[in-house]
Image (cartoon, grey):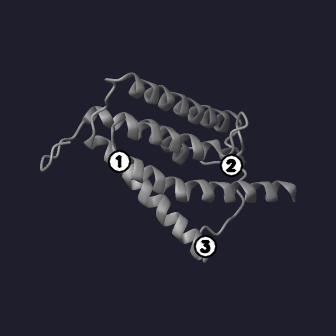
Amino acid sequence: MERGVVVIFLSSIVIPLLILIPNMIFFALKPTNVSVVNNESNNTAEKILTAFEWLGRIGIFILPIFYKINTSSTQIKVFLLLMILSLGIYYACWRRFFVRNRDYSLLFKPLWLIPIPMAVSPILYMLFASFVLNSKLLLLSTVLLSIGHIPISYNEYKRTLAITKV
């Protein structure tokens, strides 16, 4: 990106869109077996994690359009393959969720020994995307997202386990 010039690369919008598509379906087809939860936490640590998560989300969905997809080197092609692998795991989790009656707990259960894969796989996808796009700002946004998203998802996973044991 040149100094003083803002360039938008519409081809790069595909990166966040691939993460958003199953989420849009999720909003149309609500999960089942959701226990009633008060999402408004009074816990300061959780509020801070949520702030990090949202700051990261904003960055990962906006920043890619300002960077060109680069596939010029072998190293970048490896990162692109890792992006595709991470996205494949993410889609496998969504498939499991939709095929198994949209059970809420499936949003957090391990898949193929990967803990909280629906939190980890999109973060890995965006991490690898930051290298493909050569974007330090996207890398920073991904780190911010991970600081909030992974612990929040893990806590929700523990909560769903506790509810199923009752």
Where does the image place residue 93, in percent across and percent down from the top left?
Answer: 63, 36
Does residue 40 show up? no
Along the line of sight, which residue is nearer the eye, 136 or 160? 136
Q: Residue at x 59, y 53 (%)?
A: 150
Question: Is residue 27 visible to the viewer in this orientation of the structure?
Answer: yes
Asked if the residues shown at circle 2 and circle 3 are in contact, with their CB atoms under 8 angstroms apart, the answer is no
Q: Residue furthest right?
A: 166
Give the class, few, some or many, for how many residues have Cα within 10 Å of label 3's Cα (few <14, many ≥20).
few
Q: Give the number of marks.
A: 3
Amino acid at pointer 1: Lys
Q: Residue at x 81, y 59 (%)?
A: 162
Per the model, the C-alpha gap separating discs 3 and 1 is 32 Å
* Relative side of 30 to 57, left or right: right
Q: How far is mark 2 from mark 1, CA to CA?
A: 34 Å
Crowd around label 2: few <14 · some 14–19 · many ≥20 (10 Å):
some
Judging from the image, what secondary structure is the residue with disc 2 in? helix
Q: Which residue matches tag 2? A: 104
Q: Amino acid at mark 2?
A: Tyr
Instruction: Tell me residue 32's x, y (percent).
Output: 69, 48
Left or right of 154 in this view: 127: left
Indicate the quadrant containing the N terminus: top left, top right, bottom left or bottom right.
top left
Could you say which quadrant of the image residue 114 lies in?
A: top right
Return the x and y of residue 118 as percentages of the image width and height: 60, 43
Mark 2 and mark 3 lie on one chain; the one further toward the N terminus is 3
Q: Which residue is mark 3?
A: 41
Q: Quadrant of the C terminus?
A: bottom right
According to the picture, the residue beneath numbered tag 1 turns out to be: 136
